[in-house]
Image: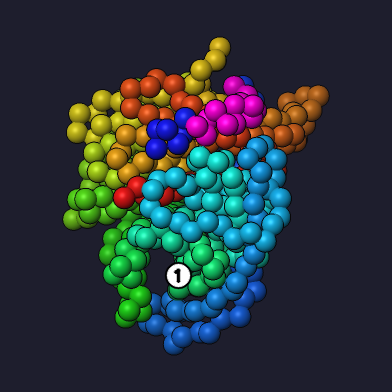
Amino acid sequence: MNNILTTSAMKILGVCVLGAALLTACGSDESPSSDAPETEVETAEESDTGETEVTAETTTTTTTAPSSTTQPPTTTSEAPPASSCDGSTLALTGQFGEADSLYLFDLESAALVDVLPNGPSEPRAPVWSSGCDAIFFVSPGPDDSSLVNRVDLDSQAVTFLFEHELPIQHLVVDDDAEVFEFSSIDSGEFASADDVTYLTRYTAESGDSETYFEVGPRESWVRPLDLAATPSGTWLLHDSLTFSGIEIIDGDLETSAVELGELPLSPFGRDCCEISPNGQRLAIEAALGGSGDTGSANALAMVDLESGEAQVVTKDGENPYFYGAIESPTWSSDSSQVIFIHSSKTWDYGPDCDAPCVFLEGSIGLWLAADGNAEASLIASFDMASQYFQGEAAWMPNS
């Protein structure tokens, strides 16, 4: 993979590097809610949990980008290449091209492929199948519910697997056993003070679901940060109330705290961290200046969970920090490298402080952090089409 990433970086040396300075954004970065696309489905008998198992298939076409990823991809009927688990590809959700969709990004050729040009819209939480021939993802359903789906990368047929009544935040899939585990949030009647996080396990063969753990009520900005499958079980990462660390709830439902010391979390961060595949390290966005809001100086920290030692990764330049959000770090299979999303925005505040701010432009970068390197490398850069950008990345396993 090192050769692949080096080749990729050289091929796109001419792309624009993200600006180092960003004014603090005003207003909310939450994306407006959207109804799920209308799709004909065959509805199964509703279970006692209020969940409905549905199945449907939709064949789609492909959108492919030229090697320069600073421009939206162009449409083509060419199908994406057959996948194998070689660590060569990222699964990306968000508006990296013309649509808020699910994309494949080839780390060697820098080609970007939209695998859902006809929907579902606003996919999130991408998870590679064990054979890397499909991707599981979550899309919004009616009344704040979530639809869990599977897209076959050869045929691009989308299968809707089941519906959950709450918004799913993170997803873990054992596709051999057809078992899905996920975290979800119930905002309750008073969203400012009584959010509850649930851990739920759904078994496709029986159609049964079991909510086996809950955290809360908690303040609405204290949210689940990641759900990860490691050799020691499934771990939930959760904000601490002080933003000075995280809580880890392991497979035995034991809660432990990881204090980050001088590396506090950025408040209100989404998808800011991920546990490594070997379960020994944590990649996390750390706030190095100010209060850690969207205008603070941030870096990526790779923390050893046993010793607490952290490798802090910034970037080259006069100002080495990342201004704006660091999102969705994703580990290589050998737990030695991390790819993460960094997005920055430029605002027009008007003639005085009371004037509403206006989003002018933004950029989205894919960055690589590696063991022993204090500076991250830019892999690709994209124009940001909307101030409401939310992106997630999942690195294909290398087996």
**Residue placed at 53% from the left, 30% from the top?**
9
Left or right of residue 314, residue 104 in this image: right
**Residue placed at 36% from the left, 79% from the top?**
207
The residue that disc 1 covers is: 164
Left or right of residue 280, residue 330 in this image: right
> Quadrant location of residue 21?
top right
**Residue placed at 63% from the left, 40% from the top?**
67
> Quadrant location of residue 312?
top left
- Front position in the image: 265 or 229: 229
Toward the top, the furthest residue is: 318
Establish if 84 lies above or below 242: below
Is residue 11 something that shows in the picture?
yes
Residue 135: x and y, percent? 46, 60
- Determine whether the residue tagged by mark 1 lies in a helix, strand or loop: strand
Is residue 247 something that shows in the picture?
no
Q: Does the stretch in magenta take in 17?
A: yes
- Crowd around label 1: few <14 · some 14–19 · many ≥20 (10 Å): many
Instruction: Identify residue type, mark 1.
Output: His
> Quadrant location of residue 256?
top left
**Residue placed at 47% from the left, 47% from the top?**
89
Q: How is the image coloured?
A: rainbow
Residue 189: x and y, percent? 50, 61
Establish if 323 lies above or below 233: above
Magenta residues (range): 7-20
Residue 87: x and y, percent? 40, 46
